[in-house]
Amino acid sequence: MDTRVVFMGSPDFALPTLEALHKNTRVIGVVTQPDRPAGRGRLPMPSPVKQLADKLEIPVFQPLSLRKPGALEQLEAWQPDLIVVAAFGQILPKSVLALPPKGCINVHASLLPRWRGASPIQAAILAGDERSGVTIMLMEEGLDTGPILTQRTVPIRPGTTGAELSQQLAFLGASTLIDILPTYLSGMLAPLTQADGLATYAPMLKKMDGLLDFNQPALALTRKVHAYYPWPGTYFILNGKHIKVLDAHPHDTFESEIEGHYIVNGMPAIGTSEGLLVLDQVQPEGKRGMRGSAFLNGQPGWLS
């Protein structure tokens, strides 16, 4: 395809889509988030999309906001036929949406209208959804409200983490986009209006969202541990220090005290409003991740 495409994306989720577009279209420019401080040294680090674009020798534009002066001019200079977005991290203003003759397409990691917003993958696992998928949609000014071009579905198996589902949907989204792009560009694909009354929302996550509330059932907390791995992660506070929970599972019990400490098959467990949360993998503050049994060896007062 000789279609001139500008791609907008930032995290790892967007990489398969950029690679697929590079192989099948003319990607004339990439827009991604500005470099952000990262690591212990807090040095500016480029987004994964910028790193890939540099490797592919595609021009990169990193505006603080697409609403800032100069942003629209840069996009106009590229003269795109189509803009494709995958986890970009910014809302596209009306002026940008109206720019390409073939419109703006978004690769969204949920079965819209369920889980509009910034964290659909985590939301699906957290809610106990039995399936997820990708939606290829036309973009408009609303948050993930545009007409649907196509969807593909995958099951969510018990124990699936946010990282695992994200990788699965990233590749599914890329292949789905490439499959339907010729039909869409030829004008033969009719968009389907979303049922707004069925919409649910997945807000942007913050680090503090990972704090485990043991007033919730163990099953809900297990889903949270899986959904929030690796970001924003889950944790609880023990003796004033953060203990990250990397993996856990629920254990049924008839009697337990909320936030009480227990041992189940050699693993530490914490009482919840319904059952015990068994800590299979943890990471104490300032240390590496370890099995729950190894953590327990360093906690002689766990049951006291």
Image (spheres, rainbow, N blue to C red):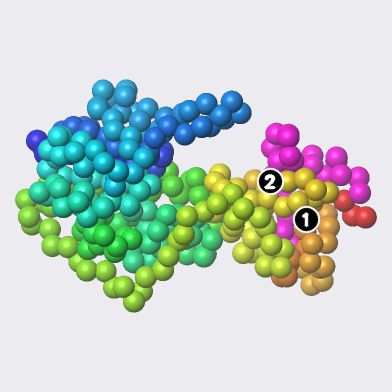
The front one of 97 and 227 is: 97
Extreme residue toward the bottom, this view: 197
Question: Which residue is labeled 2 in the image?
Answer: 244
Q: Secondary structure at mark 2?
A: strand
Q: Position of residue 133 (x, y in %)?
A: 36, 56
Q: Position of residue 188 (x, y in %)?
A: 8, 57
Label 1 sits on what residue type? Ala
Q: Position of residue 220 (x, y in %)?
A: 62, 64
The front one of 55 and 172 is: 55
Q: Is residue 73 magenta?
A: no
Residue at 16 percent across and 52 percent down: it is 98
* Residue 246 visible to an observer of this rendering: yes
Residue 56 falls in image quadrant: top left
Whether pointer 2 and pointer 1 mark residues with C-beta atoms closer than 8 Å, the reply is no
Q: Secondary structure at mark 1?
A: strand
Q: CA distance from mark 2 to mark 1?
A: 14 Å
Numbered disc total: 2
Question: Horizontally, is 273 left or right of 180 in the view?
Answer: right
Estimate how packed mark 2 is, as few (under 14), some (14 to 19) or many (20 or more) residues with alpha carbons within 10 Å.
many
Q: Which residues are magenta?
A: 276-301
Question: Which residue is labeled 1 in the image?
Answer: 269
Q: Which quadrant of the figure contains the N terminus?
A: top left
Residue at 22 percent across and 68 percent down: it is 193
Label 2 sits on what residue type? Lys
Residue at 42 percent across and 65 percent down: it is 201
